Amino acid sequence: MIHSKLSIVAASGFFLASTLLGPTPAHASETDPPQVELVLDVSGSMRADDIDGATRMEVAKQAFNDVVDALPETTQLGIRVLGATYGGKSKRVGCKDTQQIVPVGPVNRVAAKNAIATLKPTGFTPIGLALREAANDLGDTGSARRIVLITDGEDTCTPPDPCEVARELAAQGTSLVIDTLGLTPDEKTRKQLVCISTATGGTYASAKSEAELTDRIKQLVDRAAQPPPVTPAAVTGASDCPGAPLLSAGVYTDRELIGEHRFYRVSVRPDQELRASISISLDRPLNRDYGVLLKAAALDGRELVRGVDAGSGRADVLSTGLRWSASSFPFSSNDSSSDSSSSSSASTPADVCLIVSNSFASATAAGAPGMPVELTIGLTDASDTPDAPGLGRGWLLLLVLAAAGLLAGVLTGWLTRWWVAKWREN
């Protein structure tokens, strides 16, 4: 997912915005604690004894036990395994081998340790299927959700491709993050784990010892226990500015189809500055050379300011932002008539239209659902941008440049005459 941080209006402003300005961002619920599920690879490759003289499986078990002992009582924890039960050669059977051995809920240390103790390296590595099932295990309660994948190798059961599964989960617009941990990973495994984590805004790390693995799992679980301060509010942009939803300061989430334009409105007082940003998650394969555009415009369509971002090839998020202040870039806000009094326009808020558009193209996935969009809006006290020096900033600099040019010309002429005179003497 995509999370930006800006100051949010005070509580009274929230109440007013909810009644007058439509949807506003909601805080993460304190009654819905974050949930985390550990997904452990128990495939046959975990038999390798190349970590501190122990097998990878033994190291993972001990790290899990240490983490379970250190978990706070309030942690909502689940454990899922892959490749743990089928040791045969049938890929059709082995690639369905994933089970949840500890359901998501308040941590039960005895049950968790007993479940982990029985694990033995066995079969295939269906990472894509395990991630999809882990997301189902966590459900969609509205709380922050985190999957921590620990594996020593890449998926051996594609399809489904685990990176595509991660993009699918990100496209659902839910608060789900996947972190990946590689046990002594090779380059192919590292690239796959990086792809999985970045698709959902997660992190990748590698571990080559029991201490490293324990420390990294603890960090990720602790991070999952801290919900984000603001949950984006769902909003639906319009196809034109007059019909666009009127938004207050906050964080919003929407979806935009390939080649679509989405419109939103923000009311800005003359003494305020609008600061807006967008992030679009690229959750599907796209043709090369693409970009996103965020524009602020008057209601009559006149462009005020814009921000752009572009990419080519592999990327996961495009982001851009803009600033606009009525004091620096004035326009007739909600009344285009020329007889509006200056005193009235000086105190009347201006409705600014925010337009989000893209230049994406895809040969296989151009339809619904649209790309996940996160829109952040901030309203602060207006601040004038500093003037940059230039020739138009007064006559002094121009005179200095003219004098320097004259002096350089005289000096060059004198040196040339002296050199010619010396040459003739010789």
Image (tube, rainbow, N blue to C red):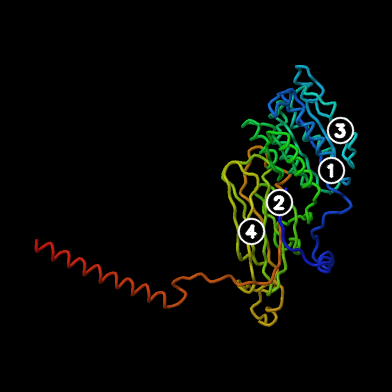
Q: Position of residue 277 (x, y in %)?
A: 67, 58
Q: Which mark is on residue 321?
A: 4
3D distance between C-alphas at marks 2 and 1: 34 Å
First-in-chain label (1 vs 4):
1
Residue underneath mark 1? 71
User: Mark 2 highlights which residue?
Assistant: 373
Tell me where residue 201 appears, x and y as whole percent.
70, 45
Choose mark 2 or mark 3, whichever is in front. Answer: 3
According to the picture, the residue beneath numbered tag 3 turns out to be 113
SS state under label 4: strand
Earlier along the polypeptide chain: callout 2 or callout 4? 4
Distance from disc 1 to disc 4, alpha carbons, whole Å, reads: 39 Å
Disc 3 marks a residue whose amino acid type is: Lys
Which quadrant would residue 233 be assigned to in this image? bottom right
The type of residue carrying mark 1 is Leu
Q: Secondary structure at mark 3?
A: helix
Mark pair 2, 4: CA separation:
13 Å
- Give, as a three-letter code, the residue at label 4: Gly
Q: In the drawing, does residue 47 fall left or right of residue 114? A: left
- Indicate which disc, 3 or 1, sits on the residue closer to the N terminus: 1
Q: Does label 3 or label 4 sit earlier along the sequence?
A: 3
- Circles 3, 4 touching at the beta carbon (< 8 Å): no
Of residues 169 and 238, the one drawn nearer to the viewer in this rendering: 169
Q: Are marks 1 and 4 in contact (CB under 8 Å)?
A: no
Q: Residue at x 66, y 31 (%)?
A: 185
| Residue 422 marker | none
Cα separation, mark 2 vs mark 3, equals 41 Å
